[in-house]
Amino acid sequence: MYTGQDVPNNVTHVKFHPSVVDVDEDAFEDRKQLREVILNDGLREIGEYAFYYCTSLQSINIPSTITKIGIDAFSNCSSLVEVVLNESLTSIGSRAFLYCKALQSIAIPSTVIEIGDSTFCGCTNLQEIVLSDGLKKITQFAFQNCESLQSIAIPSTVTEIGDGAVSKCTELKEILLNEGLKTMGHSAFWECTSLERITIPSTVTEIDKLAFSGCTNLREVVIHNEKVQIIEDKVFKGCTSLERFKFPCLFTRLENVIQAGQRDIAAKMDDIPAVEWRAGELSIPAMRRQVENEWGIVVTLVEVDKEKLDTIVRLIKYYEMKEATTLFELALWRSNMYQVDITNPTDRGAYRIDVPGPVKETVLQFLG
């Protein structure tokens, strides 16, 4: 029974006394024979390095009264297979489960707002991660080197994915990014070599350099916001299988323009080489160029054909404004008709007002 006193180095089983409120820092550090720990309800906090290097510990159930797990609390517990985290937990410290190589699954409670730096880094057998709504930030290297992970869904409450947060997860085939996400950090998904497709939500405004660098099986990128700021041109460095970028938002705008009667835009779209847009989606081919890095090594940079993208955006804007001026003319016409003297009817056409051609062209050139 643990009451807060010093713990023998050869301890194998520990049950906490109900009177214990906090697990002190370093309390069980390096107790390599410790196999079982039963924590009591009423505990509030697990201190830093509390179970650091307890290499025989196999499972831990965190009581619902605990709100904080300290830095490196279970770091290097290499036999830890099962961890149960309960609601009311709000803080998981940096490296709390670093190199827990036997851990197979983890569910993060909705009360946790932020996952600390390198929290689950090096958990090479981690196959399932369940993240709950309420989480706001995944910090740097949080899930780096989780080599057995095959899929991950980022909740809509998460606005930021930090540097290298899900990098070098070599078996990761599916990443679900939800609307609400705003930024992806440097090397966020670096060397996720099994990833084949990624969809960037419309809320994303910034993708930092090397975010998807080394994703050698990535073939398709779907971007829901053509204004997303891509920092430098190395976001997709080394993505040698990348074939195309798709822009559903642009296709929707294009369809709206055509349905509004501006059908001559179709011929102009067809004149843009290698752009596909008639099969229910709009895709722009990826461009490749080889450059020499600072160490003299030749690397392949892959990026969207910005010239084609800019041409498409300008073209759609032009026809959107062209349609807008038509609607403006109709609105003026209708307004004049409301002022007709019903006792002295006049031909409807007499009330039509056209925006002068030079004015219309000036507006279109300015906005296009």
Image: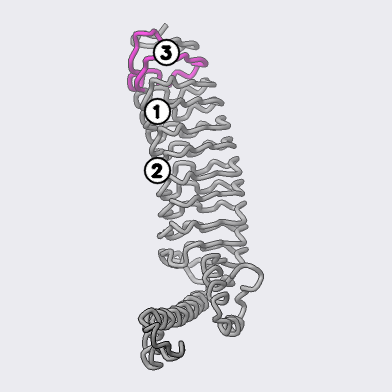
Q: Secondary structure at mark 3?
A: loop
Horizontal side, residue 226 vs residue 151: left or right: left
**Image vertical order of residue 254 relative to residue 122, above or below:** below
Magenta: main secondary structure equals loop
* Residue 305 position within the rendered picture, expressed as x and y whole percent measured from the top left: 52, 74
* Residue bearing the label numbered 3: 40
Disc nearer the start of the sequence (2/3):
3
* Residue bearing the label numbered 2: 136
Residue 180 lies in the magenta-colored region: no
Q: Secondary structure at mark 1?
A: loop
Extreme-front residue of the structure: 343
Q: Is residue 368 visible?
A: no
What amino acid does circle 2 point to? Lys
In this picture, which residue range is highlighted in magenta? 16-45
Q: Is residue 34 visible?
A: yes
Q: CA distance from mark 3 to mark 1?
A: 15 Å
Horizontal side, residue 32 vs residue 150: left or right: left
Q: Quadrant of the C terminus?
A: bottom left
* Residue 10 position within the rendered picture, expressed as x and y whole percent measured from the top left: 46, 11
Question: Label 2: how many residues lie within 10 Å, few (<14), some (14-19) or many (20+)?
Answer: many
